[in-house]
Amino acid sequence: MGFWGAPDFLALSQDAAGVVRGVRMRQRGRELHIVRVANALNADPAVAAAEVLNKLGSSRSSWFLLGVNLDGGEYFQAEMPDVPSREMFDALRFEAPREVMGLPDDFRLQFVKRPNPDAGDTVRVDCYLFANSALLKLGQMTETWRRKLDCFIYPLLALPAELPDDACVWL
């Protein structure tokens, strides 16, 4: 099911203190409106996430996004020429070993291109690298919730490129 075809949308993340926070949203036209929010704290993040999902009253037909830092994941920023996404992906795979020490052979990456008005025809790229094995571990955890994960994202990649001076962001 596509993003805009789902009846509800769930987003979960875990903060540095171990609190799992979640939001359930519903589509109205091309906008998402908050239906319910919940949070939970447990020594086991999988248990806390299951508790949040129960509090949100979610269904299996909900579109499910998880914002997490995977085990062994690495974040970096790079200045790159502004090229199409496929070429950027290939360039970042080439650049990654220079940016991250001890990079696994089977790594995957997520990236977001950000405007860079002072640098001409280059862009700032926020990139997150992780091992395939970390993704498998995440999949096993979501199976305990009896739910299919539609998408996951590293929380820093989900932030807008520019924030107002008075903005407050908790990660």
Image: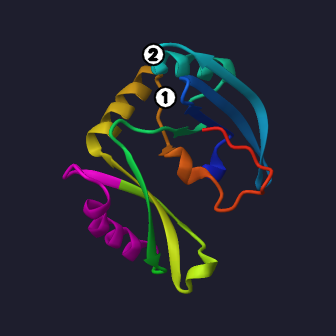
Nearest to the eye among marks 2 and 1: give it.
2
* Residue 128 located within the stretch drawn in magenta: no
**Amino acid type assigned to the residue bearing label 2 in the image:** Asp
Q: Image height check: is 98 above or below 154?
A: below
Q: Give the range drawn in magenta.
A: 84-108
| Prevailing SS of the magenta stretch | helix
**Amino acid type assigned to the residue bearing label 1 in the image:** Arg
Q: How crowded is mark 2: few (under 14 residues within 10 Å), some or many (20 or more)?
A: few
Q: Is residue 19 visible?
A: yes
Tell me the element at label 2. loop
Query: Which residue does the numbered mark 2 point to in the structure image?
Result: 44
Q: What number is the disc on residue 166?
A: none
Q: Position of residue 168 (x, y in %)?
A: 74, 44
- Circle count: 2
In the picture, the quarter occupied by the C terminus is top right
First in sequence: mark 2 or mark 1? 2
Q: Residues within 10 Å of mark 1 (few under 14, many from 20)?
A: some
Q: Image height check: is 32 above or below 12?
A: below
Q: Position of residue 105 (x, y in %)?
A: 19, 52
At 49% from the left and 38% from the top, the residue drawn is: 68
**Residue lying at the far left of the rendered structure:** 105
Question: Residue 63's quadrant in the figure?
Answer: top right
Q: Where is residue 123 in the image (x, y as percent from the top left)?
A: 52, 75
Question: Residue 85's quadrant in the figure?
Answer: bottom left
At 58% from the left and 25% from the top, the residue drawn is: 20
In the image, 112: left or right of 96? Answer: right
Tell me the element at label 1. loop
At 52% from the left and 70% from the top, the residue drawn is: 124
Q: Can residue 1 be seen in this view?
A: no
Q: What number is the disc on residue 147?
A: 1
